[in-house]
Image (cartoon, rainbow, N blue to C red):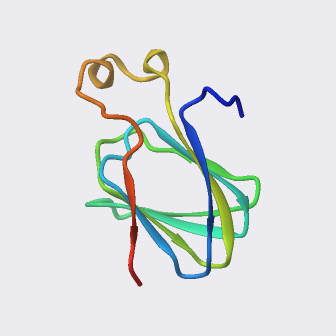
Amino acid sequence: MKPDSNCIGLNLRKDAMLRLRDGAGVQIACRDGTAWITLDNDRRDFVLEAGDHLTINEHRRTLITALAASAITLCAAPAAAQSPNQRYRRRPGLVFEQVAV
């Protein structure tokens, strides 16, 4: 990971939750542990284990829950990697908040 990249590494204890206001263009990588990802109004759920990653391609609120103590990395995709529609939307970058359990 380059120091100037738009990435952040987080350590989450079991049952900790993060909420991304808009997950579009964000890559979630699980470095250790197990993380459960769910998107608003999407019937699918994703479970990431160490070495797995997922890129969110839709403008939806995204919840990340640590099913075990976990280490994750969140990276905002560079504008060139986003679709043309995403590129011109106002994107404040990586915005997330920890949710109290």
Q: Residue furthest front?
A: 3
Q: Quadrant of the N terminus?
A: top right
Q: Which residue sits at x=38%, y=35%?
A: 93
Q: Position of residue 14 (x, y in %)?
A: 61, 81
Q: Position of residue 68 (x, y in %)?
A: 66, 79
Q: How many marks?
A: 0
Q: Position of residue 75 (x, y in %)?
A: 55, 39
Q: Does 79 appear above or below 39? A: above
Image quadrant in which you'd find residue 101: bottom left
Q: Does 48 appear above or below 59? A: below
Q: Which residue sits at x=60%, y=78%?
A: 67
Q: Is residue 46 left or right of residue 4?
A: left
Q: Nearer the viewer, residue 92 or 20?
A: 92
Q: Which residue sits at x=72%, y=69%?
A: 33
Q: Which residue sits at x=47%, y=15%?
A: 80
Q: Position of residue 70 (x, y in %)?
A: 67, 69
Image quadrant in which you'd find residue 20: bottom left
